[in-house]
Amino acid sequence: MKKIALLLFSLTTSLMIISSVSAADKDRTITATMPQGMVVVASEGRLEPRSAGSYSLHLYAKSDPAYPYDRFIAGLVRPRNGIVEEIRFADVNGDKKPDIIVLTRYTGSGAFVTVDAFRFNKRSLQPLQLLTTIAGMNAGNDPVKALKKKLRTAR
């Protein structure tokens, strides 16, 4: 009888931990829809601290709105310093196509951010590519302008 009670207690505790991790993961994932209709998902690394770790970026093809995550196209994992806060779209490399911008806000004062810019090229062997990144940028600066400037000066 004690073994059965211990087993039930262990199972209940495990389920509580799993459900609390799942609930916490919802706060660690953001989604946005590109102008072309593709869905972009940025998720902080599971079980990592909120202040640092990694994030994954997934891109899904335009599909039935009831099933937006059925057609995976590409993805990658990036280091992160802070909390993934926002996904934006803007042409930062001058090719007249919207690029994906992920903004990560440092924890603490929140006065600094990292911005990563990615392009999607369906004809490439690596369809989701990092264009550039700016770490430690003042949070008050315009990330799109800063990314464009960095890419211009790199040429």
Image (cartoon, grey):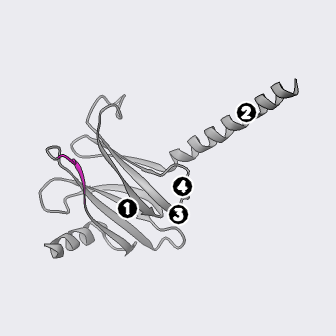
Indicate which disc residue 51 carries.
3
Name the mark nearer the viewer: 3 or 1.
Answer: 3
Indicate which disc residue 103 carries.
1
Residue beneath disc 2: 12
Proximity of marks 4 and 1: CB atoms separated by less than 8 Å: no
The image quadrant that residue 49 belongs to is: bottom right
User: Viewed as shown, does residue 33 lie left or right of 83?
Assistant: left
Magenta span: 125-130
Residue beneath disc 4: 48
Task: Name which of mark 2 and mark 1 comes first in the sequence.
Answer: 2
Can you give x and y, in whole percent of width and height, for residue 113 in the image? 41, 69
User: Viewed as shown, does residue 13 lie left or right of 150?
Assistant: right
Q: Could you tell me the amino acid type at mark 1?
A: Leu
Question: For this rendering, which residue is in front, 4 or 64?
Answer: 4
Mark 4 vs mark 2, CA separation in Å: 24 Å
Indicate which disc residue 153 carries.
none
Proximity of marks 3 and 4: CB atoms separated by less than 8 Å: no
Element at badge 2?
A: helix
Element at badge 1?
A: strand
Q: Residue at 59%, 44% (x, y): give it.
A: 21
Mark 3 vs mark 2, CA separation in Å: 30 Å
Can you give x and y, in whole percent of width and height, for residue 121 in the image? 17, 48
Mark 3 vs mark 1, CA separation in Å: 14 Å
